[in-house]
Amino acid sequence: MTDHEIITAADHKMARAVEVMDRDLQSIRTGRASTGLVERIHIDYYGTQTPLNQLAGISVPEPHQIVIQPWDRSALGAIERAIIKSDIGLTPNVDSNVVRLNIPPLTEERRHDLVRVVHKRMEEARVEIRNLRRDAADQLKKLQRDGDVGVDEEHKLLESLQKTTDRHVADVDRVGGAKEQEVLEV
């Protein structure tokens, strides 16, 4: 790998770490309904584990309710069981052909617990980004030891890598801060 390929690859992996954290944070329940709470729940559909968003239309008709309308009515029972088994803590109400999830308001204590979960996930993402930086820096130092780049070039590349790292850590803070505000909003 060339020096610029190393930094580009690290940049891509760091961006991916931020995306994964953002997707994980979407599944954290706030006081407001969001399709992100349920779309990744897997349903046992005829022996195959299938994500809910591939089996049903998911909508938010009002701020405290999620409506799941399966395309195959025979999947209603499986969807209900999967929601009960999931860790989202909501009880499904099954009507004739839809599943309704009512989102109760969060208590102050529960909001603070969720903020701690958000902070933990943010720190995991930061650690992952720092590990990617360390791996890329090791590769750059190896290039310098092998004589492929000079000492000055290596120093510039390490500075560029640090700027990339700082940018992605700032993204983690921005995304996590927005989720924290959403959780604390009453």
Image (cartoon, helix red, strand yellow):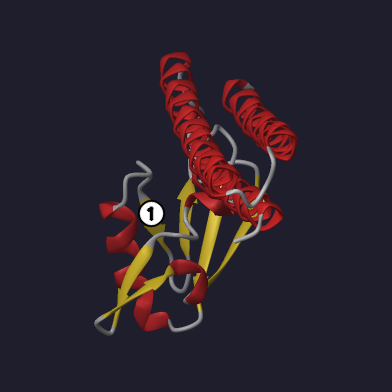
Q: Residue at x 54, y 43 (%)?
A: 145
Q: Quadrant of the N terminus?
A: bottom right
Relative to residue 157, is residue 10 depicted above or below? below
Identify the residue shown where x is 62% and y is 33%: 172
Quarter placement of the C terminus: top right
Q: Which amino acid, mark 1? A: Pro
Q: Up-down: is 29 above or below 10?
A: above
Image position, residue 14 (x, y; %):
59, 45
Q: Position of residue 101 (x, y in %)?
A: 46, 51
Secondary structure state at the residue bearing disc 1: strand
Considering only vertical position in the picture, is 9 above or below 122? Answer: below
Q: Position of residue 33 (x, y in %)?
A: 58, 44
Q: Is residue 56 left or right of residue 109?
A: right
Looking at the image, the residue that sits furthest to the front is 147
The answer to which quarter of the image holds residue 150 is top right
Query: Which residue position holds label 1?
Result: 92
- For the residue pair 185 and 124, the one nearer the viewer reads as 124
- Residue 51, picture quadrant: bottom left
State the residue at coordinates (63%, 52%): 148
Q: Is 185 placed left or right of 160 in the picture?
A: left
